[in-house]
Amino acid sequence: MVYTIRTLPDDCLRKVAEPLERITDEVRKLSADMVETMYAARGVGLAANQIGVSLRLITIDTSSEKEGHPLIVVNPEIVEAQSEVSAEEGCLSVPGFYEMVKRAERVIVRAQNLEGEDLTIECAGLLARVFQHEIDHLNGVLFVDHLSPVKKGLFKKEYLRDRR
């Protein structure tokens, strides 16, 4: 099932998602639907709250052959971040808007897979950026929150005005 992706100014995007206590068949079905939704939207990552579900669940696929290698993680958290680099970001929940954002170049993420096994993922580059972006979503933070005050003001003035 392909969900509708929530966009600003939807309130669900600003809520902190709840930790998943148990991985059930419903959670597995939800994650499969999230992967399908992410691919349909041509995204590289999706957080559950982007489809209105307040759970700490994300899907990611940065592979060049889309629809082949999704990474699904439960309760992810960044435990270490190194270096810093700027790159252009966009977001499925902020369609049509792109801006340069500073993020850590390398991160270590702790999470669980759908079998409940603990994972430690060390990554850099695009995968590290996507993890940071999607974990921000789980914390009610959007990439536009990382902009300078001037750019944030322009964003609010132009983008949000056009969306109302």
Image (cartoon, rainbow, N blue to C red):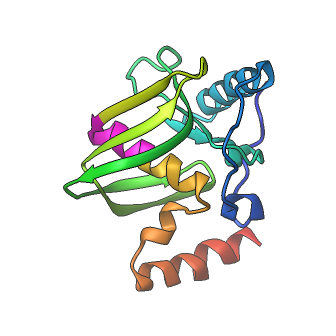
Residue extent of the magenta highlight:
123-131
Residue pictured at 52% horizontal, 38% vertical: 45
Q: For the point 68% across and 52% down, which residue is it?
A: 17
Say left or right for 149 vs 4: left
Q: Which residue shows up at 77% across the image and 41% down it?
A: 4
In the rendered image, residue 21, in percent from the top left (x then y), is placed at 70, 36
Give the residue at the far left of this rendering.
83
| Dominant secondary structure, magenta | helix
Question: Measured from the top left, where is residue 151 in percent x and y?
Answer: 43, 79
**As rendered, which of 49 and 92 lies closer to the eye?**
49
Quadrant of the rendered image containing residue 121: top left
Q: Quadrant of the N terminus?
A: top right
Q: Is residue 26 left or right of residue 67?
A: right
| Vertical side of 90 occupied by 9: above or below | below
Q: Is residue 55 magenta?
A: no
Residue 138 is left or right of residue 104, and the answer is: right
